[in-house]
């Protein structure tokens, strides 16, 4: 498996065994179907690992499910690490532990790859390439070795480089690093937010309609119910499919080339 380019991290549920619907803890208050303990299958997970309410997630306002993104870790663990076995056949505890670690590793890879696609700082790009190689090496280890990986220690080092990358990308866009802040529900309508860094910010239900978002950084930002109808995000940074799925857009919303428009948006108006 290759990891070059963000398109390598798209979820392929048909090649997974419902790991996110089983291994993880759910809270109904966070937009999931039920309160569910980790390691227990969701009540809507079918025998063939399909979701029986998948087509209703948007209408049921299951924002937790819509926003979740394993960055391709589910199919990697199922097909590569466990050679096609599912959690009913394999060591369930080990498989779930590996999946949780793999999601974090895939997420780091996604952000590092996205950063290198945007950066012009050759020294920093080379350092990021080193982290990418290190993480790929870990992902190619055995299940037992993967489960023993100290992901938090690695994440701390990766986050330092990503912080440098975010600063650099913001400066590339507008000559200085403009730090955004939490703004849930705020009306930004038609504002020029180009180059702003909204990494890890809370932007739930904010109104971004008509905003200029060239090189705007949304790394880890909470975009649940954020209004992006008719907005051009095609040149925004670090947007994930999960963030887009949880936002409110329509057919006129423009997305980066590596992301797909949610079907529910086709019925939305400006």
Image: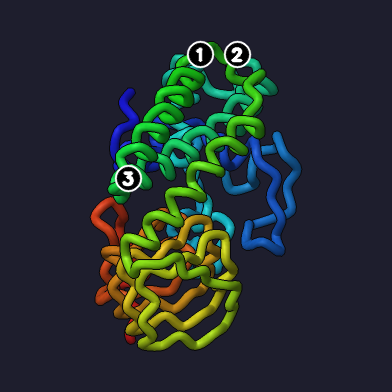
Query: Pointer 1: what residue?
Result: 141
What secondary structure is found at the residue carrying circle 2?
A: helix
* Mark 3, residue position: 121
Callout 3 touching callout 1 (CB < 8 Å): no
Q: Earlier in the sequence, mark 3 or mark 1?
A: 3
Tag 2 and tag 3, C-beta contact below 8 Å: no
Residue 50 image offset from top left, x and y in percent? 47, 41
- Asked whether the viewer can see residue 5, the reply is yes
Residue at 47 percent across and 65 percent down: it is 197
Question: Is residue 13 placed above or below 237 in the rendered structure?
Answer: above
Q: Secondary structure at mark 1?
A: loop
> Is the residue 19 above or below the residue 86 in the image?
below
Q: Is residue 235 above or below residue 183?
A: above
What x and y, as percent, mark residue 11? 40, 41
Calculate the distance from the C-alpha at mark 2 to the C-alpha at mark 1: 6 Å
Q: Is label 3 in a helix, a strand or a loop?
A: loop
Compute the Cα span from label 2 to label 3: 34 Å
Above or below, comparing residue 93 to residue 201 in the picture: above
Q: Are marks 2 and 1 in contact (CB under 8 Å)?
A: yes
Residue tagged 2: 145
Q: How many marks?
A: 3
């Amino acid at each position: 498996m290759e990891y070059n380019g963000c398109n390598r991290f798209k979820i392929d549920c048909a090649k997974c065994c419902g790991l996110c619907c089983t291994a993880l803890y759910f809270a109904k208050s966070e937009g999931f179907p039920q309160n569910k303990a980790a390691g227990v299958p969701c009540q809507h997970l079918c025998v063939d690992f399909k979701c029986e309410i998948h087509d209703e997630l948007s209408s049921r306002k299951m924002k937790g499910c819509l926003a979740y993104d394993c960055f391709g870790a589910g199919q990697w663990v199922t097909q590569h690490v466990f050679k096609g076995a599912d959690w009913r056949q394999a060591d369930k505890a080990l498989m779930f532990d590996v999946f949780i670690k793999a999601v974090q590793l895939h997420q780091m890879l996604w952000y590092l790859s996205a950063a290198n696609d945007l950066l012009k700082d050759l020294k920093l790009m080379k350092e990021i390439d080193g982290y990418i190689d290190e993480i790929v090496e870990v992902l190619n280890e055995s299940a037992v070795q993967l489960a023993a990986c100290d992901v938090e220690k690695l994440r701390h080092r990766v986050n330092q480089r990503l912080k440098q990358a975010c600063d650099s990308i913001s400066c590339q866009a507008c000559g200085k690093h403009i730090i955004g802040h939490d703004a849930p529900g705020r009306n930004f309508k038609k504002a020029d937010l180009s180059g702003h860094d909204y990494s890890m910010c809370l932007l739930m239900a904010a109104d971004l309609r008509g905003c200029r978002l060239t090189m705007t950084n949304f790394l880890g930002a909470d975009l649940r119910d954020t209004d992006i109808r008719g907005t051009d995000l095609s040149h925004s940074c670090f947007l994930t499919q999960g963030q887009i799925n949880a936002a409110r857009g329509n057919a006129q919303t423009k997305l980066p080339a590596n992301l797909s428009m949610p079907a529910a948006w086709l019925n939305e108006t400006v």
